[in-house]
Image (cartoon, rainbow, N blue to C red):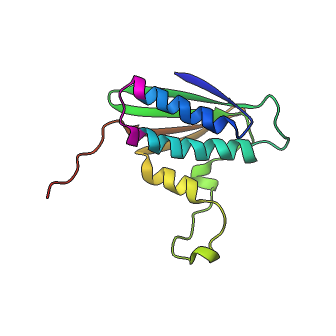
Amino acid sequence: MEFKYHHDLKELSKLAEDLENFGESHDIHPGIMHCFNLCLDEVLTNIISYGYDEGPDEHAAHLELSLDEGTLTAVISDQGKPFNPLEEAPEPDLEAELEDREIGGLGIHFCKQMMDSLEYKREGNWNILSLSKSAEMPALPED
């Protein structure tokens, strides 16, 4: 399925709704969809907030969701400034006291922790970030 989000933070609620509907229609556990919502909310927020020099206009981010052989993949693309969040986003200092930490950087860190794989590429004028995760909930450990 394909979705389009305009350059406006109000689109985050549409993203959450689209993910919920996709998860329900494909019988994907809400916990898996929650992980995708957290990550894609972070990515879309960064695209809207930092991807373009000018304010809201016709810019949009495109999202493609697919489920193939038990793996859920989200590919989000935009024509903003070239930016590879997997290499260019600063690593957060998780050892520092909360009041001493730099603002930002945790979102991509959490995405790296929650997803099975993340890949970035730049094709022409497009930033393309792929996030994949098994759509199967892991079994709970037995006592």
Is 102 a magenta residue? no
Whether residue 122 appears in this view of the structure is no
Residue shown at 58% from the left, 74% from the top: 98
Measured as percent of width and height from the top left, residue 94 is found at: 52, 70
Q: Nearer the viewer, residue 122 or 22?
A: 22
Residue shown at 58% from the left, 34% from the top: 15
Measured as percent of width and height from the top left, residue 50 is found at: 74, 48
Measured as percent of width and height from the top left, residue 23 is found at: 42, 30
Q: Which residues are magenta?
A: 24-32
The quarter of the rendered structure image containing the C terminus is bottom left
Residue shown at 33% from the left, 31% from the top: 70
Figure quadrant of residue 100: bottom right
Residue shown at 45% from the left, 45% from the top: 35
Is 26 a magenta residue? yes
Measured as percent of width and height from the top left, residue 16 is found at: 55, 36
Left or right side of 61 for 74:
left
Q: Nearer the viewer, residue 40 or 128?
A: 40
Left or right side of 66 for 120:
right
Q: Is residue 27 above or below residue 95?
A: above
Q: Is residue 130 above or below residue 65?
A: below
